[in-house]
Every structure is written in C-alpha cells, then in structure tokens.
Amino acid sequence: MTDADPPRSITVLSGGVGGARFLQGLLRLVGDEAEVTVVANTADDIWLHGLKVCPDLDTVMYTLGGGIDAVRGWGRTDESWHAKEELAAYGVEPSWFGLGDRDLATHLVRTQMLEAGYPLSAVTTALCERWRPGVRLLPMTDDRVETHIVVDDADEPSGRRAVHFQEYWVRLHAEVPAHAVVPVGLEASTPGPGVLEAITRADVVLLPPSNPVVSVGTILGVPGVREAVRTTRAPVVGLSPVVAGSHVRGMAAQLLAAIGVEVGAAAVAGHYGARSRGGVVDGWLVDTSDAGEVAQVTDAGIACRSVPLMMTDVDATAAMARAALDLAAQVRR
Ligand code: GDP
Ligand code: CA
C-alpha cells in the first residue's frame, strides 16, 4: 500500500472492556473498508463450576455483537442471576464471580465444545457465528494461561499467596497490595492459529488503551508474539490507557506499580519501548491533559501526539481511532 491508501487490514491486541470500547470506535470509523482482526487476551480465563469462562473474549464478542450490558461494561444485557443464587444457596464457592444466567449459556456451549476436542480458537469462531462482532476474533493462544497475583496472606508461612487474577479483581477489588503478576503457563504457550500472521501481514497494528500488564502484556508474552510485533512491516501505534496519571477504570495503576512502572502516559510508552530500539511501538497517543509528556515519549524514539483519549461515547472513540491511524500513516513514511 502507499501512504495515501487507507489500511485494509488492521490488527488490534485487546483486553476486555477498554479494548472492546476502542474497537467499537474503530469499527464506526472504518466500516467495511478494512478487515479488523482482534488478538484477545485469554490470561483472565478461569474455570468456574466446571465451566470455562473467557471474560475478555466474551466482552469483545458481546460489545461488538450488541449483547453487552453497557452500564456494567461486561456480561449480558437483560441479565438475571438465578443460577448464581442457587449455587450460593448450596454454599458452592466461588460465590463472588458474576455469572449471569444468559452468560452461562455461552460458557456451557464453550465448555461442551472444548470437551468435544475443539480448540478455543474454533470455539470462539463458532460463538461469533451468533454474535457477528464484525471482527475476526482470535484468542492469543489455545493453551491454558492464567494470570495470578501475589497478595498478602497472614495464614501462609510465607505471608503471601497467589490468587487468580479474577479473585484479585472481582473478590478483592484490587484493593490489597499486589506484589507480583505471575502469568502461569504463558512461557510454555504457543500463539493461536492465525495470530502471528495477523500481526505480520497487517497494514497497521494497534495497541488499544487496554491494560498494559494483564491484557496487552500477556498477549505480548505469548512466545513469538512480541517478536512478530517487533518485526512486522506494519506501523505499530498504541493509545495510552493512563490519562492524567489515572487508569480511568480498571486496575492498571495497581498492576503497573506491581511491575515497577510509573502510572503515567509516557511511562507506559517507555515500558512498551520504541521498535527502533527493540520495543514494540512506533507511535503513541497521549491524552491532551498529558500534552506535557509528549517530549518525553519522543525522546524515547516514539512518535507522539496528544489528542482527547476519553472513550465517553462511540464518536469520541472513533476520533481516537482516526488519530491512531493518522499517526500510523505518518510513522510509516
Ligand atoms: P479489561 O480486560 O476489561 O480490564 O479491559 P482492557 O484491558 O481492554 O482495558 C482496561 C484499561 O482500559 C484500563 O486499565 C484503563 O487504563 C483503560 N481505559 C478504560 N477506559 C478508558 C478511557 O476512556 N480512555 C483511556 N485512554 N483508557 C481507558
Ligand atoms: Ca481482562
């Protein structure tokens, strides 16, 4: 493609809520003009009551397919909670996870297909036949990977315990100190079908404002993925998930602190690093409130612009996607 051509294929490395909202804006912007492939984080996945639950895949699928509860930002619209109440009445743990009745059907279908021998990627494709999210949705890996967070526990001889990421976030509300982030199984995982090709053959690769530690960080940690992002001929542009020193929503601040990265727009860019210096991004967008950090990002070898980065509605988010594609076109030159 030449500089003037709009990208025909765009690959996005996405977590759940932040990634899904960004994708809504991107799809509003590009319509049918580009094929969008989403490589989704699966390290938040959890087995509950014998069912395989994939929060980030489902958040993207429901959001883009029109099934999301827009107020909560996760789970199904028009949800009821009878099964959860019945499980609690039996005293079955864990009782803290929000497992809605409609959502349960997705997990039942997924688990049944997994047990019949289909890989998660094939199951995801099958689920998307119903939801038609308008993107090609690829799990980062078909292997089991689970992020665990090391927290304090006075009952343990070591004084610490690793809990599943969902327990840290949903039960503990990310309010206890996080000492370490441990992506169990990540090093031994292999990229899902189509994942590396989606990165190496894209016209543009985007890092949405997803969590840099437990969403984009885990995707990049699948062996081969970071290298594909480093070496793709496509420009790679990221959008800061930190605005004015805050993660807006979620728990990125706590987890950035846990891995020793400052909670700032420029610091996250520095954490990803410039591709020209062994990192993974060519360009980086910071919010207008962080315009003072542009020079710091540029000094790190990353092209940087400040634009409004609050995903208040789909139009505002489409404007963010526009700015990301414009920056991609500039760094390609
Ligand atoms: P999760 O898997 O549901 O946590 O979702 P993601 O990892 O895809 O995205 C979560 C991240 O999105 C949060 O940590 C925030 O930093 C970021 N985020 C959420 N809303 C906004 C927003 O309006 N603007 C920006 N720039 N970032 C946001
Ligand atoms: Ca997630």
Image: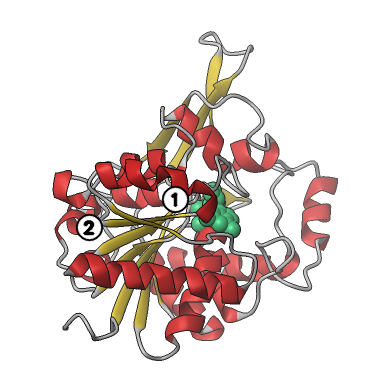
Give the quadrant of residue 196.
Answer: bottom left
On screen, 11 above or below 126?
A: above
Instruction: Provide residue 216's location: percent of width, then percent of height.
Output: 39, 51
Identify the mark nearer the N-term, 2 or 1. Answer: 1
Nearer the observer, 94 or 201: 201
On screen, 288 above or below 299?
A: below
Residue drawn at x 78%, y 73% is 78
Question: Going by the picture, which residue comes out furthest to the top?
Answer: 157
Nearer the observer, 74 or 109: 74
Instruction: Provide residue 294's location: percent of width, then percent of height.
Output: 38, 48
The image's mark for residue 271 is none
Residue type at mark 2: give it. Val
Closest to the camera, between mark 2 and mark 1, is 2
Q: Under tag 2, what secondary structure?
A: helix
Dot 1 beta carbon under 8 Å from ligand 1: yes
Nearer the observer, 121 or 263: 263
Q: Under tag 1, what secondary structure?
A: loop
Which residue lies under the disc numbered 1? 215
Q: Is residue 330 left or right of residue 259?
A: left
The image's mark for residue 229 is 2
On screen, 234 above or below 134?
A: above
Residue drawn at x 30%, y 57% is 283
